[in-house]
Image (spheres, rainbow, N blue to C red):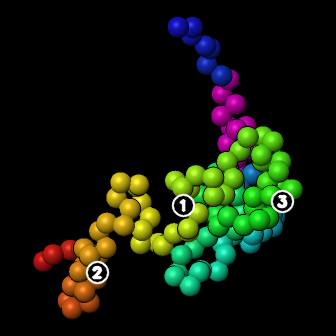
């Protein structure tokens, strides 16, 4: 394994100064992030409460198939690239999701009764502090 020479001592100071300048610039001079970059765009929940994402990122997870999503200009381009479209595969869950059902595929939908029981138990007890500490 080749040994490299140690860098000159001023490299450390130069790098630290550059990082400090970057930090100060971002903290005081840069604009805040756009709102649409900080949120995942979703459609309003359906009648059954399931949530669908509004845009296809890489894979069409939780995207409701529609004519535009399957045959619109971006969908035709995706077809040419060989991408998966909303509704092509059931594993991408085009029916949407409920927050309580999220998790690994093998455990989806399980554990609901345990969570309800724990919520009821915590509602009955007045712990006055952290609900996970047993005294």
Q: Residue 11: percent from the left, percent from the top?
A: 70, 31
In this rendering, the count of numbered labels is 3
Q: Residue at x 66, y 28 (%)?
A: 9
Place of residue 18 in the rendered image (x, y in percent of width and height, measured from the top left): 74, 44
Q: Name the residue under label 3.
A: 72
Q: Earlier in the sequence, mark 2 or mark 3?
A: 3
Q: Mark 2 points at which residue?
A: 116
* Quadrant holding the C terminus: bottom left
Q: Which residue is drawn at 52% across and 81% down?
A: 49
Q: Which label number is shown at residue 32?
A: none
Q: Residues within 10 Å of mark 2 (few under 14, many from 20)?
A: few
Left or right position of 121 against 86: left
Q: Going by the image, does 58 lie left or right of 104?
A: right
Establish if 1 lies above or below 132: above
Residue 106 visible to an observer of this rendering: yes
Nearer to me, 45 or 126: 45
123 versus 82 height, above or below:
below
Q: Is residue 22 left or right of residue 95?
A: right
By secondary structure, the bulk of the magenta-drawn segment is best described as: helix
Of the numbered discs 2 and 1, the one sitting upstream in the chain is: 1
Circle 1 packing at 10 Å, graded few (<14), some (14-19), many (20+), is some
Relative image position of residue 50 (x, y in whole percent): 53, 75
Find residue 42 and report its image quarter: bottom right
Tell me where the magenta segment starts and ends, as one range: 8-20
């Amino acid at each position: 394994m080749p040994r490299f020479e140690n860098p000159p001592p001023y490299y450390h100071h130069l790098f630290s100064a550059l990082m400090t300048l970057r930090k100060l610039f971002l903290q005081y001079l840069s604009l805040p992030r756009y709102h649409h970059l900080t949120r995942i765009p979703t459609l309003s929940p359906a009648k059954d409460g399931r949530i669908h994402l509004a845009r296809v990122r890489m894979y069409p997870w939780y995207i409701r198939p529609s004519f535009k999503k399957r045959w619109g200009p971006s969908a035709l381009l995706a077809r040419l690239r060989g991408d998966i479209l909303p509704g092509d595969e059931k594993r991408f869950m085009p029916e949407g999701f409920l927050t309580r059902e999220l998790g690994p595929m093998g455990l989806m939908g399980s554990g609901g009764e345990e969570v309800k029981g724990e919520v009821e138990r915590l509602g009955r007890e007045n712990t006055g502090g952290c609900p996970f500490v047993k005294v």
